[in-house]
Image (tube, rainbow, N blue to C red):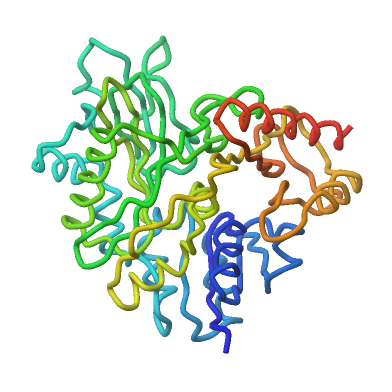
Amino acid sequence: MTTQVMILGASVRAAAFSARRAGYEPAAADRFADYDLRARCDVAAVTDYPRGLQRVAQQWPGLPWMYTGALENEPALVDALSRGRDLWGNPGRVLCQVRSPARVATALRDAGLDVPPFAMDVKDVPPEGTWLSKPLASCGGNAIRLLGGSVPPTTKGRYFQRRIDGVPCGAVFVAAGGRAKLLGVTRQLIGTDWAGATGFQYAGSIGPLRLPETLLASLTRIGECLANRFQLLGLFGVDAILADQTAWPVEVNPRYTASVELIERALRIDAVESHVEACRRGRLPPSHPEGDANTSCFGKAVVYANNDVTTTDRLTRSAVAANDGDWPRYADIPKTATDIRTGHPILTVFADGPNEPLVERRLRDRVETVRQWLS
């Protein structure tokens, strides 16, 4: 008998498809209820996100559930949604701790790990170096700003972090019993202009990265420290900057992350099954296989609107027709006649190949194809 699971978040398509590949039957609710999600899952759209999730969840009473971004910023809501059902993930008390920049920095420094300098008050930011103003309730790189200039910084609900120049990456872990296992690492596309992203917006991932043992060991120590100190459970991610043979952690995402579907494809693992085993039985997965030797690199890119657009029937039909099997070329496909504002996501494209430059080139080509379908 197939086990049902309720999946909630701002956008749940990736996690829902991962759950299906692992043999689960997802009931999904998010802000978009996109075409491809509706075609494969029981779906509800949430117009008053995130508060409306409680109302929507009532139609699936008693189902176990898991969440995606950005519900880690709503610990009280997570606990409320968990009443009367099993949570496969981290409860509110864990979220309150691991989403605190001060607590995370203290834990990592106590373990002898490098952490970017930070301040909770703009008055404590030193004059030297480049600093970022970041929201405490962050998601996807939105609302991150460079600190400086003539405009006084907004400080309410924000903190300040020294900017580290290097390669942005996302490390994916699974945790149980105070331990963590590193599943893989991807390079993040941040503010990528060819995808229509600006500033520090997350625009996609490419990987898995083949990193030196020193960096892998550093990332592993970061994950183990966080899992032990905060008793993390299941899948979680760490955003980091790789610079000078050092991994600088900049944010912790204590849930299924955007790059999980790339890691599971490359390594041929069922990430959601590993998540469930960790949450329900306290088990970590065994060593994973090496992946496909012929197609060893995978990528995804979020296509952002360069101007206000209304999606066309051509876009929907073409994206659906291009897909076959469990691994799509186009995903998060909006319904025809959906109004999308400038700077908001249209859909997601995927590509694969033997190396990063070729995968990135194929992603760029598919982004341009999407824009042609909109014309």
Q: Nearer the viewer, residue 285 or 166?
A: 285
Quadrant of the rendered image containing residue 178: bottom left
**From this viewpoint, which residue is outermost toward the bottom?**
1
Q: Position of residue 250 (x, y in %)?
A: 31, 35
**Which residue sits at x=34%, y=53%?**
173
Whether residue 334 sits left or right of residue 290 in the image: it is: right
Q: Position of residue 82 (x, y in %)?
A: 40, 76
Residue sitting at x 33%, y 40% = 251
Looking at the figure, which quarter contains the N terminus? Answer: bottom right
In terms of depth relative to the viewer, which is nearer, 60 or 107? 107
Q: Is residue 371 above or below residue 138?
A: above
Judge whether 38 appears above or below 240 on screen. Answer: below
Quarter the C terminus occupies: top right
Question: x%, y% of residue 241?
Answer: 34, 29
The furthest residue to the front: 293
- Quarter-wise, where is residue 58 in the image? bottom right
Q: Nearer the viewer, residue 33 or 177?
A: 177
Q: Is residue 77 left or right of residue 311?
A: left
Q: Residue at x 23, y 56 (%)?
A: 227
- In the rendered image, the vertical position of residue 22 relative to residue 370, given as above or below: below
Q: What is the x, y in percent for residue 50?
A: 53, 59
Left or right of 118? Residue 134 is right
State the residue at coordinates (61%, 61%). 30
Count of marks, rendered view: 0
